[in-house]
Image (cartoon, grey):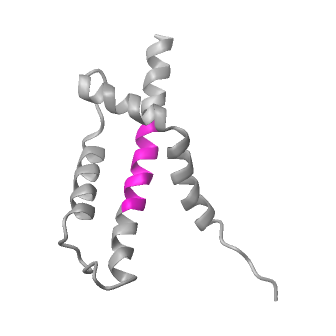
Amino acid sequence: MSKFTSARPVQNIRHGVQLFRSRKTLWQMIREVLSGSYRMSWLTILIILVSIAYIVFPFDLIPDFIPFLGWLDDGVVLYLLLRRLVRETQRFNRFKAMERKG
C-alpha cells in the first residue's frame, strides 16, 4: 500500500511564505489604510483586532501554561490571521491595478 501525502500542509506554509514575500505590499496597504486612501474590509479589521487581542492577552480557551496545547490555539489564530492578510493583500493588489488602469 502506497503512502499519500496531503498537499494541505504545503498550502498552509505557502500562506506565510506568500505574506513574507509581499511584506512591502502589506506595509504599503497599512500606510494607505491609515491615510484613508484604501478601505480594508470590516471583516479583516475585525479579524486583525480579535486575533491580536487573543494572542497578546493571557485569557485563552486553552491556558498557555499547558505546554503544547496552550500554544496550539494561539498558532491556529495566527494561521487564520495570516490567511486573511494574504487575501487582503491580494485584494489590495487588484485595487492598485485598477487604480493604475483607470
Residue at image coords 30%, 45%:
44
Q: Quadrant of residue 52?
A: bottom left
Rendered position, 48 above or below 102: below
Q: Is residue 45 left or right of residue 94?
A: left
Against 10, residue 19 (above or below) is: above
Q: Is residue 91 above or below residue 10?
A: above
The answer to whether 47 appears left or right of 19 in the picture is left
Query: Which residues are drawn in magenta?
Result: 78-90
Closer to the camera in the image, 46 or 28: 28
What type of secondary structure mainly makes up the magenta span? helix
Specify whether residue 80 is painted magenta: yes
Q: Position of residue 73 (x, y in %)?
A: 34, 73
Who's the residue at 46% across and 45% down the image?
A: 86
Residue positioned most to the top:
102
Res. 90 visible in picture: no
**Residue 49 visible here:** yes
Q: Quadrant of residue 87?
A: top left
In the displayed structure, 8 sits above or below 66; it is above
Where is residue 81 shown, x and y percent of the image? 37, 54
Counting labels gives: 0
Kindly identify the residue that appears in the image at 19 percent across and 70 percent down: 58
The residue at 43%/25% (across/down) is 95
> In which quadrant is the N terminus drawn?
bottom right
Instruction: Point out the residue furthest to the right here.
Output: 1
- Horizontally, residue 21 falls left or right of residue 86, namely right
Say whether residue 53 is magenta.
no
Is residue 53 found left or right of 2 in the rendered image? left
Q: Position of residue 45 (x, y in %)?
A: 25, 44
